[in-house]
Amino acid sequence: MSTITNAIPKIYDKAADFMPINGTDYIEIYCSNAKQAAHFYKSAMGFQSLAYAGLETGLRDRESYVVAQDKIRLVLTSPLKSGTDIGRHIDQHGDGVKVTALWVDDATYAYNTAMERGATSYMKPVTEEDEHGKTVRSGIYTYGETVHMFVERKDYNGIFLPGFREWKTSYNPEPIGLKYVDHMVGNVALGRMNYWVNFYEEVMGFVNILSFDDNDISTEYTALMSKVMSNGNGRIKFPINEPAEGLKKSQVDEYLEFYEGEGVQHIAVATDDVVKTVRLLQARGIEFLRVPTTYYDVLEERVGKIDEDIDSLKELGILVDRDDEGYLLQIFTKPIEPRPTMFFEIIQRKGATSFGKGNFKALFEAIEREQELRGTL
C-alpha cells in the first residue's frame, strides 16, 4: 500500500532540519562529448549557453559546458585525455549524472555535519576565488558513484563558479518553458532502498513523505518499490527505487544492468504549460513514451474536471493524476543516451504534491513495450 504525508511544511519538524538547503544549484553530467551534448540540450530542450571551463581557462584534463534555462543549470563534462576518473566513469556507466549540487548557506557546516553523521567524503571544503568573489564547495557520496556537492555562493557574483568564463554563442534557440528541477529519481540495488532512506534521514535530515510497494508499482510482468525523500522546505525531493520480484526484468533491473551500478534514473523538470512545452520538445525531435489512447476514454471519470483540453493531452501523450491537493500533468521521454538509462520527466503541478500513482500501471506497461523492443524485458 502507498502512503502519503500531507504537504511538507505541515509535517516537517523545523527543529530537525539541521541541514537547510536552498535548492538545486546544478546537475553535472559526465558525457563523452560535452560540446555535442551542449548542442543537444540547446537545440532539443531550449537551454542557453552560460559558462565554459577547459583548455582556455587553464584546465588540462577536462572541459565543461554549462547550459541554463530559468533555474536549471546543467554542467556537461568530458575528459580531454585518457586515464582520467571522468573517462573511467563514462566507460563503466555511459553518459549520466555524476553530481547533484545543492545550494547551501554554509558548505563547510553542511559537510562537517554530514561527515559526523556517517557520510563518505568526496571533497573536503574548498574555497575557490576569482575577480568576482569566492565560493566554497564540499561533497559527499550517495548511492553508487553519485555525489552531492554543497555549494556556498553568497560571496560570489560571477557567471557560474570561479574557473569558468562566460560562454557566448550566436546560437541560442528559444527556451521551451522549463523552470526548475522538481525531483530526481535514483535506482538502487535490490534490498538497498531502506539503507538509502536511512542515509537521507540520518545524514541529511530528509523525511520520507511518500512510499510505494510492489502492489502500487507493478504490471503483469514487472514491479518495483519506491520511497520519496524530501528536505525540510520541500525544494529537494529524491525518490529512491529498488526492483521487486516479478515474472520478468523490471525497468530498474534494466537500468542497473546497463548503467552497471546504482545511479540517477531520471530528472523531472517543471513547466507552467506542459502542453506548450511538450509540443516544442516534440517539434525539436524529443521522443516520449506513449500510453494507449484508451487511457483518455475515462480520464475525467478518474481525475475529475481539469483545465486542459483532453484531445490535446491525448494527441501528445500527456498523463494526468490527482491527489488531495490538486492534480498534475506529466510525460516521460525515452532514454536520451545510447544505453537504456537516463531520461527526463516533464511535469506541471496544479496543486498536487504527489508523483502520479494513478499513472503507474499505464506508464510501466509503456516502458515494458520499449524493453521488449530492446530485447531486455
Image (cartoon, grey):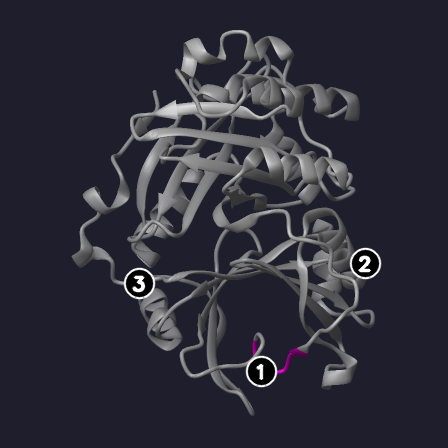
Q: Which residue is mark 2?
A: 36
Badge 1: how crowded within 10 Å, few (<14), some, or many (20+)? some
Q: Quadrant of the N terminus?
A: top left
Marks 2 and 3, the one that precedes in the sequence: 3
Label 1: which secondary element: loop
Amino acid carrying label 1: it is Pro
Instruction: Specify whether 212 is left or right of 246.
Output: left
Magenta segment, prevailing SS (helix, strand or loop): loop
Mark 1 and 3 residues: CB-CB less than 8 Å, in contact?
no
Amino acid carrying label 2: it is Gln
Q: Which residue is mark 3?
A: 20
C-alpha separation, residue under disc 1 versus residue under disc 3: 24 Å
Marks 1 and 2, the one that precedes in the sequence: 2
Q: Which residue is mark 1?
A: 162
Q: Which residues are magenta?
A: 161-165
Report the number of discs.
3
Between 30 and 175, the residue placed more toward the observer is: 175
C-alpha separation, residue under disc 2 versus residue under disc 3: 36 Å
Q: Quadrant of the C terminus?
A: top right
Can I make out residue 181 in this image? yes
